Amino acid sequence: MDVVFIFQWLDTSALADFTKTWAGLFAMVQTVHILSMVMLCGMMMLGDLRMLNVVLKGVPSEAIIANTKKWIYLALVLIILSGIYEASAIAMKLAYNTFFFAKMAGLSMGIIFMLSLRNAVYLRAPEQIGANGERAESVPVWVVKLVALANLLIWFSVAATGRWIGFS
Amino acid sequence: MLNELLLKFATWLDTFQASTDLHEALYMYGWVEGTHVLTLTLFLGMLLVIDLRLLGVAFKEIPASTLIERLDRPMMIGFIIMLISGALLYFAIPVRSTQSIWFRVKVILLVAAGINALLIRNMTRASDMSWDNDPVPPKRIRIGATLSLGLWALVVAAGRMMAYDWWDCHKEIPYFMYWAAGCVNEMAAFE
């Protein structure tokens, strides 16, 4: 499907005019984008590394996952809003940038993965990983660890391809 | 005097073939910069968790000392890799970095953030952590955590601004800015 028309529309929008006029504001929005990425990745890593028993072993995983959730959602909203602002300034460049599409694919996959599998599996972490007490419907240890590894890999690729947009 | 010394050092670094090679490398420079940003997420991400706990806005049910002690290692791993990759980025573009007002601001903020981190560490040790399980820590600890978050956000902002050449030496800027950026030759032209 040809999606270039979306970028053409964005490139001629009032937002693009505004973005291109105020270079200083653009740089500040870039900073917000990076800081939101730090928040997202930091909270994701904390949850995933906890499930891999790399950090905070023995601390109930329920408390960690519950605390990280709202910060992850806040970071995602900020990333998407600042990302649209940034994209409007270089819309036509992005329309033909492979890394941008790789990042968008990774981002979509990461959000779907997090909202479905990650959330469901982490809620059912077994006692030997989660330290939340015995559960009737817990999932095997290897499933939890596989989900944690997959999630880390997906978000690592999103951040890495995002950084590479600047070099291509 | 200091500006001349810094420029001399940067110019000396610039004479190394490895510096030029890294700067002009098709992929290596990107990998180093990518590593710098990705390890920033590890270091600053863990610091964010600790600071939010010290602010009393998240992870309230987990003792503060548990987070501080047990996130220290991943945080320091991130910091060390970030520092090495940062040094390599400086080595690749030494002269422009030395004469970048944003780089100078970043280094000053880094020192300030380091001093603040030491002060927080001393304060938490001196307080015998009697507030360890309190959802909201004492005011002085919260002030330290706010400063920490603010300073690191500014470090990231200054790092991001380094990509722009608004106030580079080759631009026409006020004398004060030439001085602040260490534009030795441009300052001499003024005199």
Image (tube, rainbow, N blue to C red):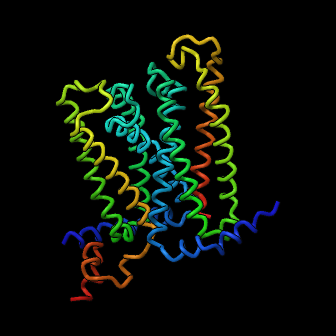
- Image coords of residue A156 (percent x, y): 58, 44
Q: Does residue B150 show up?
A: yes
Query: Quick one: B7 or B119, which is closer to the camera?
Result: B119
- Image coords of residue A69 (percent x, y): 52, 36
Q: Quadrant of residue A154?
A: top right
- Image coords of residue B10 (percent x, y): 33, 67
Relative height, residue A52 to residue A43 (above, below): above
Query: Quick one: A37 or B159, which is closer to the camera?
Result: A37
Q: Could you tell me which residue is drawn at 52 percent across and 12 percent down?
A: A133
Q: Could you tell me which residue is drawn at 39 percent across and 68 percent down?
A: B14
Relative height, residue B96 to residue B76 (above, below): below
- Image coords of residue A90 (percent x, y): 61, 70
* Quarter of the figure that contains the C terminus of chain B: bottom left
* Quarter of the figure that contains the N terminus of chain B: bottom left
Residue furthest out toward the right = A1
Q: Does residue B11 show up?
A: no
Relative height, residue A168 to residue B118 (above, below): below
Q: Could you tell me which residue is drawn at 54 percent across and 26 percent down?
A: A51
Query: Quick one: B76 or A126, which is closer to the camera?
Result: A126
- Relative to A118, B95 lies left or right: left
